[in-house]
Image (cartoon, helix red, strand yellow):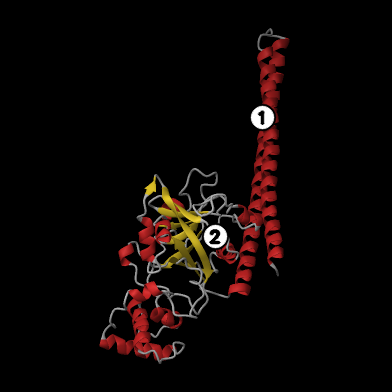
Amino acid sequence: MNLEQTLDRKNRDLSNLQKAKRDLLSENKVLTSKLNGQVEKIKRAEDMTKESGGAGAGSGAGAGVTNGRLVRNERGMLEVENEQTRIKRERKEKASAARVEGLKTYIQEESRREILDRWGQGPHQVRIEMEFPEETELNDPSLPIRYLTIELAPISIMPHSVHIFLEQVHHKLWEGTSFVINAEHIIQASALSGDEQNPLKDYATPFKTARLDTLAFQEYDELYPHEMFTVGFAGRPGGRDFYLNMMDNTDSHGPGGQEQHDLEEEADPCFGKVVDGFDHLKVMEKRPTKGELFERRVRIKSTTILTAANMVATPTVSVSTSATNVPPAASPNNPAAAAAATSTTNANNNPDPKNTGPSASMNINAAAELNPNIDPRNTAAMNNAAAATNRRGPPNTVDADRNRRGPPNGASNMNQNRVV
């Protein structure tokens, strides 16, 4: 199935959701009109009773009694009609809600199928290479490559959001855009028009043209909350912009956390977490701002969907609440760690019960450095080597200059467009 067919199908899904919403609003309008009509009947009956109140004790009293009975009958009929209307409205609301949930499930299933067909089961990682304008102007090749690596949420719980982001990256829509907002609790990327290099460039329209500017609905799962260093979509509906949580925003960005929206019970989709490039993230966080805007934007130079060969090892501990507690992950700019990345991921997926936990994962990396002849696909051999490493102690610290040099020739094509 090609991209155009996929986009057409998803556009139909979105149209069905919007139609269900319009039908519900239309039904509520009809029911409100009926209720107002019944209220008017009661008012007219009460007015008739008041007009007959000034009549004599004879025929006037009889007319008053008759009108009083009429009012009671009208009220009784109104109560019955109101109850029937309430039951009918509740039934329609439940049916509309079920239809919307069915469409959501369908979109998630289709998104999951598209991801599996094109990028496999995962985990899926995206590398974002950035440019700090001051460093670009220096034209110094010895400066480090600024990057972040984001591991996306499992497609079992956030397939729609992950699919939209992967499509955006695949079509290079984020390249040339910028990180523009530093609001202390988040750092946000946006496709604002124009930048220092291309003042007239329109970065927003390509998202709309590809129909990848918003989500079909606010996807969220409590199993993947807005913890520190996670990634979320901004706005209602979610997208295009995304942000990095610089603190635990589970309460403020989770369900019910933003009361300014009409559907305040919804949440921002949380669809990934930063697993590498923390040093660069800390440097970006300290850049000067005017209010909540960076004085000079941090340009997104390139975005790349990583393959198994250049994927970084995921930390084996949960996302930390402090930047100082983040364990060092393997980096595509670190040749030794990158060589051990695949074996570390395999070891985490098939752990040796005698060698588990964060220290075990890091010792597997160390074993790969000390034992380059070991086949990294041989999990048992890697675990045995890691056990030996535990007895000998950790290897010497890798020279930090290796991180600045990047991967050896042929290891990756992600740095070919580096500004020098």
User: Which one is earlier in the sequence, the residue at label 2 or at label 1?
Assistant: 1
Task: Confirm whether residue 368 shows in the render.
Answer: yes
Residue appearing at x 42%, y 50% in the figure: 294
Per the model, the C-alpha gap separating discs 2 and 1 is 62 Å
> Type of residue at label 1?
Arg
Q: Nearest the camera: 417 or 25?
A: 417
Q: Left of 12 or right of it: where is 342?
A: left
In the rendered image of this protein, does residue 404 appear above or below residue 17?
Answer: below
- Specify the quadrant of the image occupied by residue 165: bottom right
Residue appearing at x 68%, y 24% in the figure: 71
Q: Left of 390 or right of it: where is 231?
A: right
- Specify the quadrant of the image occupied by residue 395: bottom left
In the rendered image of this protein, does residue 122 appear above or below residue 179?
Answer: below
Query: Picture coordinates of residue 113 (x, y %)?
Result: 63, 70
Q: Nearest the camera: 107 or 277?
A: 277
Can you say which quadrant of the picture contains the C terminus? bottom left
In the rendered image of this protein, does residue 201 appear above or below residue 338?
Answer: above
Q: Disc 2, disc 1: CB below 8 Å?
A: no
Can you say which quadrant of the picture contains the N terminus? bottom right
Say which residue label 2 marks: 174
> Type of residue at label 2?
Trp
Query: Picture coordinates of residue 267 (x, y %)?
Result: 50, 53
Say which residue label 1 marks: 75
Query: Picture coordinates of residue 282 (x, y %)?
Result: 35, 60
SS at circle 1: helix
SS at circle 2: loop
Q: Nearer the viewer, mark 2 or mark 1?
A: 2
